[in-house]
Amino acid sequence: MRVLCTTIGSPSHGRAQLPLLRALAAAGHEVRVATTEEVAPLFAHDDLTVVTCMPSFTPQLFMDEEFDLGDDAPGAGAGEPDPEQQQAAMMRFMVRLLSGPMARKLREIMLPLARDFRPHLILRDGMDLGSVLIAEELGLPQLPTPSGSSNMLNPEEIHPGLTALRAEFGLPAQQDPLSVVPHGRVDYVPADFSFARYLPGSLSYRQTVQVERDSTLPEWVAELPTDRPLVWAAIGTALPMIQQRKEQGEQQPPEMPFEFPDPVKTLQSIIEAAAKLSECTVVVATGGVPVDTTGLPSHVHLTERLPQPLLLESVDLFLTHGGFNSIREAMRTGTPLAVLPQFGDQGPNAQRVEELGLGREITDRTPDGIAAVCRAVLADAGAAATARRARLRMLTLPAVEHAVADLERLVGDHA
C-alpha cells in the first residue's frame, strides 16, 4: 500500500503524524511525506520518503489578489477589537483562507506528486484541504490526522469555498458538508474527551508517550526537589517559529484582520509568573526565544527544550499555550492544565479543557493572573481526578499499530 502524507505548519503537526507513519512503514507500506523544509528534519530518522515541496506556512503566502477580508478588513469596524472579536475574526479569516486560495495552491503543488506516486491513501494535515480535492479527483480515500485545525473548523463554513473549487476544477458537487471527511478521521483521544466540535467519530488510537526515538531527560532534571509541586511551562513550536521569522525581518502584513501574539512578551510573562510560584519548582522551555533572566529565582529553571511527553509523566501541572499536541500529551500522562492560549485552535482548546474539567483557561494574561490560575489548578482535586480519568480512558484505546489494519481495510473496501 502506498500512503501519501501531507504536513504543513509547525513541527508539532509532524509529531502528531509520526507514530502513525512509523507503524505503516514498519508493516511494509511505502510512505511518502510532503512537507516543508522546517518540518522535514522531524522525519529524517525514519523509513519514510520525504519531499520538501510544501511552502513554509504563513497566511500571507496564500492570500491572492482575489482574497476578500470583507467586514474583517482593517478599518471596517469601529475601535479596537477585544480578544473574543479577534478570535472570531481569525476564525473567519482561516475558514476563507483554508477553503479558498490555500486549498487551490496546495492542490496545485500536490497533484503532480500524487499522480506520480499513485497512492492508495492520503493522510492529510488538518489545514490541507487541497488534498480533499485531490482525493476526489483521483478516486482515493483521505483522512485528516490528529489536528487542532480539524477540531475547530466547521464543515458547514468551509463547504462553500470547497464547492466553488470543485466547480472550478470540474469535480462533482458534494451536497453534504461532511464530504470533507467521507472516511472519517484519525485521532488519539477517546470520544468522551474529544476536542472535535463539528466532526463525527474517529478511528481512535492511544497517544504514545515517546515520539522521539531514544529520548531521555537530562541528569539535572533528576536533581530537582520532589517535596514541592513541579510545574512544566512551554509555548509549543509555532511561537518560536514566529519569533525566528521576526528576527529574519518578516513582518505581519497590515491587511491581516488579527494580530499574532508576541512570543517574547508571552514567554516573559510566563517566566515572571513562574518567579511568583515560590512554593513550586518550575521548569520553563524557551524554544530559543530570547528572554531576560535577570534576577531569576532558584526555583525557576530555564531550558531551550526537553522531551515533553517524558517530563509530563512526573509533573503536577502543565502551563501550556494550548496546542492540541500538548493537550493530548498531558491527557496521556494525567497532568492537569493551565492554558494560556495564543492563536489558532488554542482558544477553543482552552475552553474545551474547562468544559471537560481538565484544568482552567488563563484570561488574565499578566504574571499575577497566570500565577493565580496555576495555584488554583494545583489546589483543584477535581482537575487532578479528571486528568487521571482521562489517562485511564486513553489507555483503553488500541495502540497506534492497530491503525494499519484499519487503513488497509479502508483501502481494500475502496478499491
Image (cartoon, helix red, strand yellow):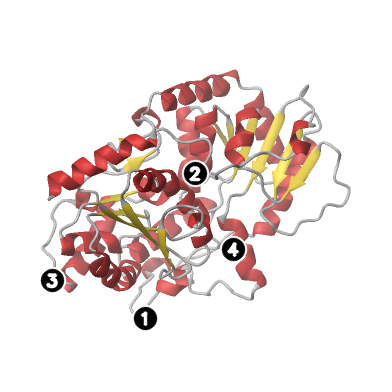
| Residue sitting nearer the eye, 27 or 40 | 27
Q: Is residue 70 left or right of residue 347?
A: left
Question: Does label 2 or label 3 sit earlier along the sequence?
Answer: 3
Mark 4 is surrounded, within 10 Å at the Cα level, by few (under 14), some (14 to 19) or many (20 or more) other residues, namely many
Q: Quadrant of residue 89?
A: bottom left
Q: Which residue is mark 1?
A: 65
Residue at the limit of the structure toward the right, as seen here: 295
Cα gap from disc 4 to disc 3, whole angstroms:
37 Å
Q: Is residue 3 left or right of residue 350?
A: left
Q: Are marks 2 and 1 in contact (CB under 8 Å)?
A: no
Q: Is residue 67 left or right of residue 160?
A: right
| Residue sitting nearer the eye, 122 or 301 | 122
Dot 3: element: loop
At label 4, which amino acid type do we have?
A: Ile
Q: Which residue is mark 2?
A: 325
Q: Which residue is mark 3?
A: 170
> What's the mark number on residue 324?
none
Question: Does label 4 or label 2 sit earlier along the sequence?
Answer: 4
Give residue 215's position: percent from left, percent from top.
61, 42
Cα gap from disc 2 to disc 1, whole angstroms:
34 Å
Between circles 2 and 1, the one closer to the viewer is 2
Residue 239, relative to residue 372: is it above or below? below
> What's the mark number on residue 242?
4
